[in-house]
Each structure stands twice: as C-alpha cells, then as structure tokens.
Amino acid sequence: MKVSVIGATGYAGVELLRLLKNHPKVEVVHITSESQTGTGIENIYTHLNNVYTKKLISMKDIDLIAKDSEVVFIALPHGHAMAVGKAFEGKNVKLIDLGADYRFKDTSIYEKWYKVDHTHKDAKRVYGLAELYRSQIKNATIVGNAGCYTTASILALAPLAKEGLVDLHTVVIDAKSGVSGAGRSAKVENLFTELYDNLKAYNVGGHRHTPEIEQALSEFSGEEVVLSFTPHLIPMSRGILSTCYANLKPGVTTQMVNEAFEKLYKDEYFIRLLGQGGYPATKNVRGSNFCDIGWHVDERVGRVIVLSVIDNLVKGAAGQAVQNFNIMCGFEEKMGLEGVPLYP
Ligand SMILES: NC(=O)C1=CN([C@@H]2O[C@H](COP(=O)(O)OP(=O)(O)OC[C@H]3O[C@@H](n4cnc5c(N)ncnc54)[C@H](OP(=O)(O)O)[C@@H]3O)[C@@H](O)[C@H]2O)C=CC1
Ligand SMILES: CC(=O)N[C@@H](CCC(=O)OP(=O)(O)O)C(=O)O
C-alpha cells in the first residue's frame, strides 16, 4: 500500500514514520511539512539517518499526494485536518486523522470544546479506537483516530460501562502524561526548567478529552455520561497512566469485575490484563502498541479503581493509526506493530 503522512515533522508524524518503516505492506510515498518544505526529514530528525532520505513536500500538493497514495495519515494540530479531508473528497483515498477533527459524532460538541467551527460536518467518519469500533473501522473512508488520554481511559472503563457494573456519574479519571503528548512546538510551560522535578495538573474541569471519553462511555452504557477528568503533566518523554475511579453498583463483586474485563478483552493482543491487584507501569509499554490494565476492587468503600497505561505516541497515536490502517486494509491487525516494548 502506498501511503503518505501529512504533518510528518511533528512527534506523532515522526512516530508514524518509525512504525511504517517496519510494516511489510507499506511504502511511504510522500511526507509533508509547511515550515520545512524541501528539507530532507533526516536533516530535521537525525535519528532517521540511513532510514529515510525523503524530502518534505507541502500538503498543498493535494493532487500529487492523492494520485500517488491509497491511504493518507494526517498528523496536524486539531482544526487543520477538516480542510484536508474536504480537499480529498472524491479522490478515492482513505484518511486516518490522528487529531480530533473527525472524532465526534455530534460536531457541535467538537465546536464547543475545541472552539473551532467544524467545516466538514457531513463527512462520513468512524471513531478510531480499534478494539471497540473494529467492525465500523473496517469499512470506513475517514477514521478519527482516538486521542491519547482517551484511549487509556476508555479502554479502562469500557468493560464496566458495557456490563453496567458501576454508577457512571461517579467516574473520576486522574491521568498523567509525558511531555511528548504536547507536541514539538516550543512552549514556555514545557521548558526543562518548568517541568523537571515538578508535577502539575492542567485544564481541570475543561480538558478537551472529557467529551470524547463521555461520548464512548455513553454509547457503551446507553446512558448519558458526564464525568470528571483531570490531566497532569509529568516529567517523562512518553507514557500515560490513567487512574479511573467509579462507585460499584450494589451487589457487584470482584468476580463480576474480573469477568467483565475478561469478556471484552480476552482475545485482544494489544490489551494485557494484569487483573485484580495489578499494577501497570508506563515502562512496560514504552515504544509499543500495548495497553496494560489492572484493577483494584476496594470493598471497604464500594469502589473500583482501574489503572491503565499506554505509550501516548504509539497506542495513543501512531500505533493505533497503524492498527486502524490494518483493519481498513484487511491486513492482520498487529502487522508492523509487533515491536517489543523498550525496557528499561
Ligand atoms: N503527541 C501526542 O502524543 C499525540 C498527538 N496526537 C495528535 O496528533 C496531531 C499532531 O500532534 P503532534 O505531532 O504532537 O504535534 P506537533 O506540534 O509535534 O506537530 C505538528 C505537525 O503539524 C504541522 N503544523 C503545525 N501547524 C500547522 C499549520 N498551521 N498548518 C499546517 N501544518 C501545521 C507541523 O508541521 P511544520 O511545523 O513542519 O510545518 C508538524 O508536522 C495533533 O492533532 C495531536 O492532537 C494524538 C495523540 C497523541
Ligand atoms: C501532555 C499534553 O499536552 N497532552 C495533550 C493531549 C495529547 C494530544 O495531542 O491530544 P489528542 O490525543 O487529542 O490528539 C493535551 O493535553 O492537550
């Protein structure tokens, strides 16, 4: 399959290039940047020396990209993929957007939380969380790849929502992300001096991943879910730990919780269940497409605490995009994604 990456100079785009290099059925034909058009990608990212020697073109070369590609990955900041999606209309190219523009069924929710007008409202799109939307992804033309915090949080809570084991109005998610989640552009709050030896929350009560998690959990449970989501920035480069709290419904036992996770995920290669009492750690998934999940039923307070970890750039972005690509193209789902986590 001939594929192109729009926004190849960002952290998500360059992680895609790393994974696509190891995909036996993929040839990367075009990569784009608007600020560094004409430059070789290996001159920007020297870790790609001898791996890629490709020059960046502009994403404005839509006709060229469309002519040469069967699938295009978009790794632009949110708000920019909609115009690309429109420009590709009728060009017989499948799109996988790593940003948020195609994640919402109801675009008014996107407009409210992202404060951007949605300019491609009628696009037929599918939410790209592979394990939970596989049958829809298979036939999709546009996939809105799930977000990073959202992937970790939805995978942690979906079994409980599907089986109706918790009161979803009591859900509280406390999540921590490495700094690559914020992208490569320079920001004062991401300086070493601000981050190192520090831990802080941000966007409390207003983070844009809140409605994405609510959308999925509402679909699985059949009830309108509202929840609290608090992200934190932690001084690591990669990794997300999502700690999810929920009150158990009366009569729900540890065994019922265990069975809910087993039922949904027992055949999922990328989801590794650490069980009741398990302690997932970001280092165990670093550089891989795995999501490790452990849970703790605290009978004393009638709550379950679910812990999940992913690599934000892999299962939270580029890896999930390749997984969705495999589903859309009919390839084995783990193709190109079997790299072992980097430990220690
Ligand atoms: N980082 C992460 O962990 C995750 C990221 N994502 C999503 O992936 C997308 C990319 O994120 P990330 O790689 O982190 O971001 P970066 O800031 O690292 O990269 C952004 C990319 O977009 C390009 N770009 C920036 N501004 C514009 C613009 N105005 N017009 C056109 N191109 C532009 C840049 O190209 P250049 O400057 O060279 O022109 C660069 O290639 C985002 O939507 C993000 O939400 C999703 C999940 C996780
Ligand atoms: C640490 C950090 O800043 N994380 C980003 C989320 C990561 C991201 O790029 O968002 P998507 O997964 O929606 O694409 C944030 O909080 O906005």
Image: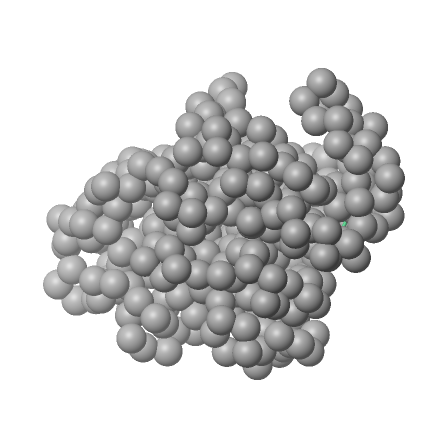
Q: How is the image coloured?
A: one colour
| Front residue of this view, candidates 214 and 81 | 81
Quarter of image, res 38: top right
Q: From the viewer's perspective, is 44 left or right of 137?
A: right
> Is residue 276 visible in this depiction of the protein?
no
Q: Could you tell me how many numbered marks the image carries?
A: 0
Relative placement, left or right, of 152 versus 206 is: left
Left or right of 61? Residue 253 is left
Splitting the image into 4 quarters, where does residue 112 fall? bottom right
- The residue that appears at 27% across and 59% down in the rendered structure is 160
Residue in the picture at 43% in, 43% down: 326
Q: Is residue 323 visible?
A: yes
Q: Position of residue 319 (x, y in %)?
A: 50, 40
Q: Can you give x and y, in whole percent of width and height, for residue 11 in the image?
A: 68, 41
Q: Is residue 301 above or below residue 325?
A: below
Which of these two is toward me, 95 or 230?
95
Picture quadrant of residue 196 = top right
Q: Measuring 55% from the left and 60% from the top, which residue is drawn there? A: 92
- What residue do we see at 71% from left, 42% from top? 31
Looking at the image, the residue that sits furthest to the front is 67
Residue 312 place in picture, x, y as percent = 55, 43
Q: Where is residue 78 drawn, in percent x and y? A: 67, 61
